[in-house]
Image (cartoon, rainbow, N blue to C red):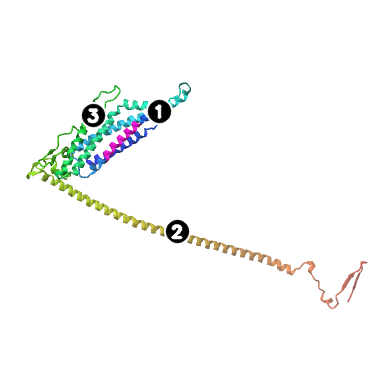
Amino acid sequence: MDSLDFAADVAELTRAAIRLGNKLNGLYNQKCPTSKEFQVFGREVKAFSGVWQILQPCLEDSRPFLSPYCMQILSRIRSDTKSILEQVVDFTDNFVLEDRRATRQAEARTRTTFIIWGRRPVNDDRTHRIGRFFTDNDLSVQRGQLLYASTTLQLVLTVINYARTLPKSGVANRVLDNSNLIINEQNKAREEIRKREQRRRNPGVQPPQVRATQWLGKLDLSPSETDASGEVRSSPFGRLANCWVRPERRPGSTVLGDRSDVTDSDSRGTSSYRTIINEPRAENNARAQEMQIQTQQVQNLNHQMQELARQLHDVVRELRDMQSSVTHYRRERAESVRGSDNAKVDSTYSSRQRDEAEQESKRQMPRDRRARQCPPASQRQFSLPPSERGFSRASSRISYNGSIDSGYE
């Protein structure tokens, strides 16, 4: 499997472990002391995910760092621990459903039988359920396997760190002579998990689906080899580094045992070990330089894209300003056209009123003329005929006796 694909699978496993750890921590209740076991179990699962997170950068490197043998060990651990986490998740989900149902029944039973039997705390029932959960499912095996996986991954990290910072001086190598203590603890953990996997169980308990003892065999505990000057020529970590780390990724591979005199035959004849690995190392260096060039090109393209995006933003802002100006101009133009239309309507209306007034005045003009030509009877004056104009105006008086006196002045 490719290291990058394996790193993606490890990331998925890490997320699943974190979710399970949070779920187990959520089952802890301060009122129930027995539930603290869930909190401890959740911390163990999160510690397991943390070790994978520390190891993940070594897997994401484009240049392989770990040997195929070490990758095979890690692949078995990832696959088996994934099965363990899935099994624990199923057990936990079933317990949550059973716990909720039992809590409701206990509360109802407490309310109905309080007078007769007295109050029984619900936490007592939950304590019994938690103990039965860890006993019936035999989670001690799964917890031991996860702890053994964590210690194995920590050992791999220790060997990787040793291979990266391998000292070249014999004085500094004397400090690393205590590596057999860690190897001894790893072998003890393997023996303990082997006993847990092989012990006899209750009839209703299923046997473990995973055998953690198959991940890694018993490690060599032979003491470190030193030369006459006291320099460590071969230590337990050195032997593990020879098996788990690629030779080209070890800066001080010449001090890891007697590997400097290893020879191999090729088409050009007999060559030393370091001469053989020079070609893949040169290829890896060329590939790394090419990746750096491509990374620089990608950064330049990103800068260009940012500059183009900035220019596009300026153009869009100018277009918005122009659009607002055009909208304002159109609004003013519409208002001016509306004002001219209103003025035309007003002028048309006033001219129509003027025409109507003139027509009305023309209709009334003959009446006024007739009225002036024919005054009313009270205002009419009668004139004497021309034959009587020489006489004085006659006056008429009407006496009280009804006679009429007329005379000439």
- What is the number of callouts on the image? 3
Q: Are marks 3 and 2 in contact (CB under 8 Å)?
A: no
State the residue at coordinates (63%, 63%). Answer: 356
Residue, x 26% and y 31% (percent of image)? 145
Label of residue 327 in the image = 2
SS under mark 1:
helix
Marks 3/2: CA distance?
A: 83 Å
- The kind of residue tagged 3 is Glu
Label 3 Cα crowd, 10 Å radius (few <14 / some 14-19 / many 20+): some
Q: Where is residue 325 in the image (x, y as percent from the top left)?
A: 43, 60
Viewer-side residue, 83 vs 158: 158
Q: Quadrant of the N terminus?
A: top left
Q: How far apart are marks 2 and 1 (CA)?
A: 73 Å
Residue 123: which disc? 1
Foreground pick, 260 / 307: 260
Q: How far apart are marks 3 and 1 (CA)?
A: 34 Å
Q: In this view, does 24 lie to the left or right of 200?
A: right
Left or right: residue 95 compared with residue 388: left
Q: Mark 3 = which residue?
A: 192
Q: What stretch is highlighted in magenta?
A: 36-53
Q: Is residue 48 magenta?
A: yes
Q: Nearer the viewer, mark 3 or mark 2?
A: 3
Extreme residue in the right direction: 401
